[in-house]
Image: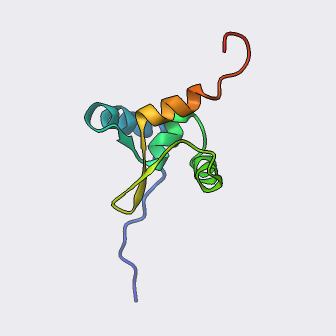
């Protein structure tokens, strides 16, 4: 049996940034890849943090984890350290 599914090439940072920008303008919920890019971390790191219960708030939409931009920003802000924090 032959698998006819198209293989996806990994999205480049510009494409992810553009998709995140468009999502923010039209829908505040980002995919895990977009959320990781928004935070400046690897998607696997975000997944690990979610599994450990230490990541930003997320929701299951249609079988996929989604992250609200405001939740990402709040989670990031709560981790400030150093001078001026």
* Number of dots carrying numbers: 0
Nearer the observer, 2 or 19: 19
Q: Residue at x 65, y 23 (%)?
A: 80
Residue 23 seen in this snapshot: yes
* Residue 14 location (% of width, % of height): 44, 34
Query: What residue is rendered at 43% in x and 32% in y?
Result: 70
Left or right of 83, for residue 61: left
- Residue extending furthest right? 82
What percent of the width, then of the height, locates residue 3?
Answer: 40, 79
Q: Above or below — where is 70 with respect to 12?
A: above
In-image side of 32 versus 24 (left or right) = right
Is 61 positioned to the left or the right of 46 in the image?
left
Quadrant where the N terminus is found in the figure: bottom left
| Residue 14 visible in rendering | no
Query: As drawn, is 8 to the left or to the right of 51?
Result: left
**Which residue is found at the position 35% from the left and 76% from the top?**
4
Report the coloring of the rendering. Answer: rainbow
């Amino acid at each position: 049996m032959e698998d006819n599914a198209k293989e996806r090439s990994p999205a480049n940072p510009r494409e992810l940034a553009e998709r995140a920008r468009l999502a923010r303008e039209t829908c505040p919920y980002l995919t895990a890849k977009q959320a990781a890019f928004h935070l400046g971390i690897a998607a696997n790191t975000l997944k690990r943090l979610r599994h450990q219960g230490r990541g930003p708030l997320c929701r299951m939409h249609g079988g996929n984890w989604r992250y609200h931009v405001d939740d990402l920003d709040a989670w990031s802000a709560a981790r400030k350290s150093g001078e001026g924090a």
